Image: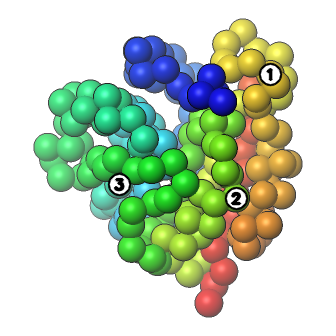
């Protein structure tokens, strides 16, 4: 099933600033209601495009970007100024395991990744593990609707399916706000205690 994975040879697509017209993080950021987050994690960060945007929204935070592609991470290390500034830490990860300590993150984000996961419940459990109590998880991914770009419809996942999987993994206050035309959003938080 490797056909569902993003082809690193197409990394220019990940860096296209036009993405922000369709996937603007300013639309979901207020809904997260984060108060001065210190550490954020992006699972499936690719070239760090979205990581850099998140760091703009949280000027006092650092972000750990994780990906299974060393090729994409290498590009990000060479091209993202946030790396040399010490705000963006890029690390290789296996698909269903997050190589970080438990309860360290204020926010975990997965952008355009969920539809590629072979074991979504395993990675969601890992997201919950690394989040602080009441930490937030946000998933943004291709909705199963007609769109002029994106992966085939048969591998896309609805926001409700993502939300159901988050609830199954133990997340609370799971919501699916309708923010984008072609993308679904599921958000929730880890248990408070």
| Dot 2 crowding, Cα within 10 Å, few <14, some 14–19, many 20+ | some
Farthest residue to the bottom: give it.
Answer: 193
Above or below, 20 against 58 in this view is above
Image quarter hosting the N terminus: top right
Q: Nearer the viewer, mark 3 or mark 2?
A: 2
Q: Residue 153 carries which label?
A: 1
Q: Horizontal and vertical percent for residue 35? A: 48, 69
| Residue depicted at x 31% and y 58% | 62
Q: Is residue 95 left or right of residue 166?
A: left
Q: Is residue 190 left or right of residue 105?
A: right
Classify mark 2: helix, strand or loop.
helix
Q: Horizontal and vertical percent for residue 10? A: 45, 14
When asked about the image quadrant of residue 4, the answer is top right
Farthest residue to the left: give it.
Answer: 84
Above or below, 76 against 159 in this view is above
Of the numbered discs 2 and 1, the one sitting upstream in the chain is 2
* Residue at the spot of label 2: 121
Above or below, 164 against 48 in this view is below
| Dot 3 crowding, Cα within 10 Å, few <14, some 14–19, many 20+ | many
Choose between 49 and 96: the one closer to the eye.
96
When asked about the image quadrant of residue 76, the answer is top left
Q: Which of marks 1 and 3 is in front?
A: 1
- Residue contact between numbered discs 1 and 3, judged by CB atoms under 8 Å: no
Image quarter hosting the C terminus: bottom right
| Residue depicted at x 35% and y 54% | 64
Classify mark 1: helix, strand or loop.
helix
Q: Horizontal and vertical percent for residue 3? A: 62, 23
* Residue at the spot of label 3: 64
- Residue contact between numbered discs 3 and 2, judged by CB atoms under 8 Å: no
Q: Horizontal and vertical percent for residue 141? A: 67, 36
Classify mark 3: helix, strand or loop.
strand
């Amino acid at each position: 099933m490797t056909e569902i994975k993003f082809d690193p040879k197409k990394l220019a697509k990940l860096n296209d600033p036009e993405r922000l017209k369709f996937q603007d993080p300013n639309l979901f950021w207020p809904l997260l209601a984060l108060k001065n987050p210190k550490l954020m994690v992006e699972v499936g960060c690719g070239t760090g495009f979205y990581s850099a945007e998140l760091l703009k929204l949280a000027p006092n935070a650092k972000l750990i970007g994780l990906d299974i592609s060393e090729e994409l991470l290498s590009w990000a290390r060479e091209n993202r100024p946030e790396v040399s500034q010490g705000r963006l830490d890029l690390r290789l990860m296996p698909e269903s395991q997050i190589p970080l300590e438990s309860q360290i993150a204020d926010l975990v984000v997965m952008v355009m990744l969920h539809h590629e996961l072979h074991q979504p419940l395993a990675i969601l459990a890992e997201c919950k593990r690394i989040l602080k109590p009441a930490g937030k998880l946000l998933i943004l991914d291709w909705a199963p609707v007609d769109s002029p770009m994106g992966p085939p419809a048969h591998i896309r996942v609805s926001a409700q399916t993502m939300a159901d999987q988050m609830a199954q993994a133990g997340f609370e206050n799971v919501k699916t706000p309708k923010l984008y035309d072609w993308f679904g959003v599921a958000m929730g938080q880890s248990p408070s205690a």
